[in-house]
Image (tube, grey):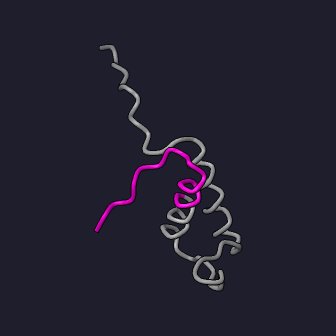
Amino acid sequence: MARTRKSPSKRRYGSAAKKSVGSAVRRSKRGTLKSGRGRRSKVKNRKQAIAIGLNQARRRGAKVPRRKSS
């Protein structure tokens, strides 16, 4: 029986945003990614690192989905 190929799924964000998020995650692993007012506190949470990367990508005008409103 032949296997059918699945259609490629839609990406949530573009390659520029992917690079920005990857960079932020790497920097958080090294302990050089900082957040907060005056950049005092180090980022220890992976989700926070991803959020910072996506925010940087948004500022640069990369293809990133809108933030979810609360």
Residue 21 appears in the picture as rendered: no
Query: Is 68 situated left or right of 65 in this image?
Result: left
Q: Where is residue 2 in the image (x, y as percent from the top left)?
A: 33, 14
Magenta-drawn stretch contains 63: yes
**How many labels were placed on the picture?**
0
Percent x, y of residue 27 = 68, 66
Residue 10 screen position, x and y as percent: 39, 36
Q: Which residue is drawn at 33% across and 19% down?
A: 4
Q: Which residue is drawn at 57% across and 57% down?
A: 59
Q: Which residue is drawn at 50% across and 64% down?
A: 51
Quarter assignment of residue 15: top right
* Residue drawn at 33 percent across, 60 percent down: 68
- The quarter of the image holding the C terminus is bottom left
Above/below status of 5 relative to 70: above
Question: Can I make out residue 26 in this image?
Answer: yes
Q: In which quarter of the image is the N terminus?
A: top left
Above or below, comparing residue 10 to residue 34 in the picture: above
Q: Magenta span covers which residues?
A: 54-70
Instruction: State left or right for residue 58 relative to residue 1.
Output: right
- Up the image or down, 24 lies above or below 5; here it is below
